[in-house]
Amino acid sequence: MAQPEHERALALGAVFQALGEVRSIAEHGRDDRSRTEPCITGLLGDYQGSVERLYGRPGALDPGLRDVIGHLTQPTAMHLTRYLISVMQLERRLRRDRQRLQDLARGLDRARAQADYFGELTHDSVIHNLADLYSEHISPLRPRILVQGHAVHLQDARNAALIRSLLLAAIRAAGLWQLNGGGRLRLVLGRRRVIESAQAALAET
């Protein structure tokens, strides 16, 4: 059985990986499919006690783990800090709203069936469906995440949909972080231990 510290490290890595791709799309207009696909895999998958299995393969979350280590060691991207705080707050509000959570879960089931039909997790129809779920179930909650970047990238329909899908994936991963004993205090007071756990998880792959 996976150790809670290992599970927490991978879950936080998934949060950072999704948010890192949000920044990349907003600022540069592109995503790295090898980083994006595991995020969508984790969003649509069925968690059965192993974050690593949920996200598809060993090493799938290595970029996110590296981001955890880098950002918690020496924060340089304040946008990322703001996104992280907002995602943690939104996950907590969503978790407390049982009806909204159930409605979102049903929507994700439909998106999963859609991905199976197209045979591609990042098919445009799937991504736009996930973006609609974010707009319907997450956007009404506070705080709203205001993604900063270049207007030409943010106004592109595919980019906007993928950003919303990745924010939804980050919220799902934040829920896994919380489920395995994570929380804001652990990030603030136990930062060194979190970094060490991420380094250990990265060393395993």
Image (spheres, grey):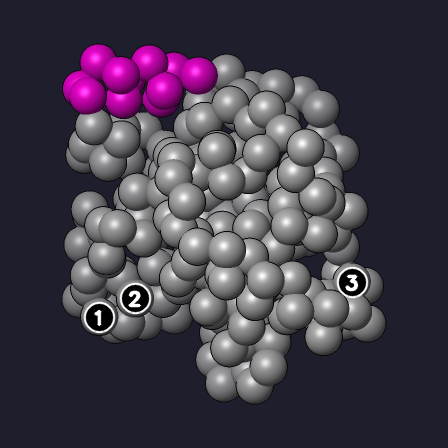
- The image quadrant of residue 197 is bottom right
Residue 153 is situated, as x and y percent measured from the top left of the image, at 21, 63
SS of the residue under disc 3: helix
- The residue carrying pointer 1 sits among few (fewer than 14), some (14 to 19) or many (20 or more) residues within 10 Å by Cα, namely some
Q: Looking at the image, is mark 2 or mark 3 earlier in the sequence?
A: 2
Q: Looking at the image, is mark 3 or mark 1 earlier in the sequence?
A: 1
Q: Which numbered circle lies on residue 186?
A: 3
Give the magenta range.
109-119
Q: Is residue 192 magenta?
A: no
Q: Which residue does the image show at 71% across and 52% down from the upper left? A: 5
Distance of label 3 from label 1 (alpha carbons): 32 Å
The quadrant the C terminus occupies is: bottom left
Q: Is any atom of residue 17 visible in this view?
A: no
Residue hosting label 2: 24
Disc 2, disc 1: CB below 8 Å? yes
Q: Which numbered circle lies on residue 131?
A: none
Give amino acid for label 1: His
Give amino acid for label 3: Arg
Q: Is 62 placed left or right of 5 in the picture?
A: left
Disc 2, disc 3: CB below 8 Å? no
Give amino acid for label 2: Ser
User: Does residue 105 sit above or below 131 in this rendering?
Assistant: above
